[in-house]
Amino acid sequence: MVKTAAESLIPTLEISTRGRGFLEISGELQAVVRQSDVQAGICNVFLRHTSASLLITENADPDVRRDLENFISALVPDGDPAYFHSMEGPDDMPAHIRSALTCSDITLPIRDGRLALGTWQGVYLWEHRTRPHRRRLDITIIATL
Amino acid sequence: MVKTAAESLIPTLEISTRGRGFLEISGELQAVVRQSDVQAGICNVFLRHTSASLLITENADPDVRRDLENFISALVPDGDPAYFHSMEGPDDMPAHIRSALTCSDITLPIRDGRLALGTWQGVYLWEHRTRPHRRRLDITIIATL
Amino acid sequence: MVKTAAESLIPTLEISTRGRGFLEISGELQAVVRQSDVQAGICNVFLRHTSASLLITENADPDVRRDLENFISALVPDGDPAYFHSMEGPDDMPAHIRSALTCSDITLPIRDGRLALGTWQGVYLWEHRTRPHRRRLDITIIATL
């Protein structure tokens, strides 16, 4: 599912999604940070797409993601006849709106050689399209001096 | 209310909230930047929780925050029977949704040894839970060379 | 429309908007990155205002922006009598809410001397006020070592 490029401070992740839903990528990001050998600094994660999002949310109870998906599906209905942009189907424009309401870039602290996430925080790739897609993330690690 | 760790470029803030509402943290962040002695660069602020947010908004009229709270309360109702995740009460899942619709991380420019906020911009910790919580923020300062 | 300050790694953009709507700034940002001569790193863009946003969205079909504007206008109605903060008119408080639901800061990767945007990604300044405004953006470029 994940391929990591060779360069230490500017890796790339390629992630295959199974359609609409959440994939936790905290482990993949921790691996990239570990490989960089940076002890303190920041890790910028950037998603090169406008129909998926990066999300930090609760990582313990899967019902949290189920409720998030239900909430956003009701707020941004698929196939709304008001949409002008619908070339790729009923989930096309909703995916862009969901992306605009959430994030394509996150910047996380590195402490003691690890992403300093809270106990209950996970980083997720949130696929908004109903069909599977291959998504690319660029990761940049900057050390404090 | 606020404790600052000793290390110059990787400090931690611990903030006690009084339950749902806004606490301005611009002053605390400016103090951290000042202590770092960095003149130009960026300041990354990261909140280690998924039921509160970091928000940049208008700092002059408290009615702006009142209207923001009213808006989001109506958009994400407490105790909605549709939620599956409600272990910690009617404000549990709404807090995660509010967090997903706003930000857990912000990265701000430093100029002339200060956060370069606009005249009317304040940085706020937005507590989404109804009861008081202790919230931890990690701050990372990176200087341009 | 755009003025760029002289300093290489900490430039400023000033952009005049024509009122509510989207202005693509990808080209301006690419020019700033090119001038910096940084090959790999990050570019932080910060908007010094709380009634406009920075948005990354689809850059090919203008209907995407039309649908985004229609969606947010319906979600955050102008002139809602529920708003307490309305000093500057019916679009005053909605502009702050739109800003809170989107972003004031974005941090983008630099690869091979360019912003590593996806093929269909554009960076936009989203003006939320109905009248034209002059908007200031601070740009900070940090190189990986």
Image (cartoon, coloured by chain):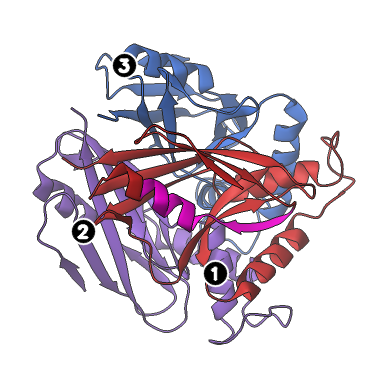
Chain colours: A blue, B red, C purple
Mark 3: amino acid: Ser
Q: Which residue is mark 2?
A: C28
Residue C96, label in figure: 1
Magenta part of the chain = B20-33
Q: Is residue C68 left or right of residue B118?
A: right
Q: Which residue is mark 3?
A: A36
- How far separated are the C-alphas under marks 2 and 3? 32 Å
Q: Nearer the viewer, residue B72 or C17?
A: B72
Q: Is residue C97 visible?
A: yes
Is C60 contained in the magenta span?
no
Label 3 element class:
helix
Q: Position of residue C100 (x, y in %)?
A: 55, 60
Letter of the chain that mark 2 sits on in the rendering? C
Residue C97, quarter of the rendered image: bottom right
Letter of the chain that mark 1 sits on in the rendering? C
**Disc 2 and disc 3 in contact, CB within 8 angstroms:** no
Q: Position of residue C30 (x, y in %)?
A: 19, 50
Residue A13, quarter of the rendered image: top left
In the current view of this chain or complex, which residue is farthest to the right?
B81
On screen, residue B7 above or below A85: above
Label 2 element class:
helix
- How far separated are the C-alphas under marks 2 and 1? 25 Å
Do the dots labelled 2 and 3 sit on one chain? Answer: no
